[in-house]
Image: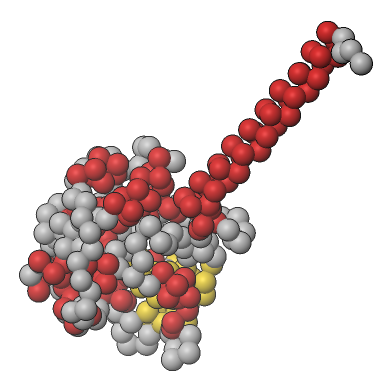
Amino acid sequence: MSTTWAAYRRARRQSLQAWVLVILIIAGGLAGIGWFFTDGQFAGGQDPVNGPTEAPVFDPDWMKPVEAVQPVPVGSAVDALEALPVKGRAGKDNYDRNEFGQAWLDVDRNGCDTRNDILRRDLTASEFTAGSKCRIASGELREPYVGQVIHFRRGSESSSAVQIDHVVALGDAWQKGAQQLTAKQRQSLANDPLNLIAVDGPANVKKGASDAASWLPANKGFRCHYVARQVSVKAAYRLWVTQGEKDAIRRVLDSCPGQRTIRAM
């Protein structure tokens, strides 16, 4: 049986179309895999979240500056990231929370402990406990990590609903340069408002001591501020990043190239 030229061309065209389809399917699969190992691993199983895009840093009316090791650089968060040293993690076997001083010291000497300072800064409609000008009894938090409004009320079973997160976790800081800081500098790092945000308790527990390579807020709109704040803290306290952490932060900042460093003043 002979094959006409038209039939040959038609068969060849169908074969090429089939190969193009196969290539597109493979390319789509590879793109999906790449997405999963960047943003996808954080977004999988999450509903869209609408929440704050930034968090407060400093209120000069009643807060006093905490002295860092050096000023946060002014300008692009990407430039500040590129200036951070890139190294591996130091050991954590000798990590002890007490190396950063007693929890919630009044480092800025404004008369109130750090936890209540941050609650006062971040909550709206806040009220003090009777007879106190420091202890926050209640208030509302427009929470940045999960994007929900949380009604805070002080109590043995309710206070943990709102926790104060170290943006750069102290365990992470210990492995990335804090061991070389003085005791006073570590106290400042642990109590610096730049490194502290009032957040959803369960989200804070889930984050633990993770860096940006293994945890990012579910509220995607907050991620640019979040990683820029991490970069700013690490710059201010001469901490370093791992290569994986730097890559993760850069992926976030690529979505907001105009993001600047976060400064207290």
Q: Quadrant of residue 155?
A: bottom left
Q: Quadrant of the N terminus?
A: top right
Q: How is the image coloured?
A: secondary structure
**In the displayed structure, does residue 219 sit left or right of residue 207?**
right
- Which residue is at 71% across, 23% downward? 16
**In the displayed structure, does residue 12 sit left or right of residue 163?**
right
Residue 198 against residue 98 in the figure, above or below: above
> Where is residue 176 drawn, in percent x and y?
20, 63
- Which residue is at 73% across, 29% downward? 18
Q: Quadrant of residue 256?
A: top left
Residue 132 against residue 87 in the figure, above or below: below
- Which residue is at 13% across, 62% downward? 67
Residue 257 against residue 56 in the figure, above or below: above
- Which residue is at 19% across, 66% downward? 90
Camera-side residue of 185 and 162: 185
Residue at the far top in the pictured view: 5
> Where is residue 163 drawn, in percent x and y?
40, 75
**In the displayed structure, does residue 38 sit left or right of residue 177?**
right
Q: Quadrant of residue 207?
A: bottom left
Camera-side residue of 75 and 178: 178
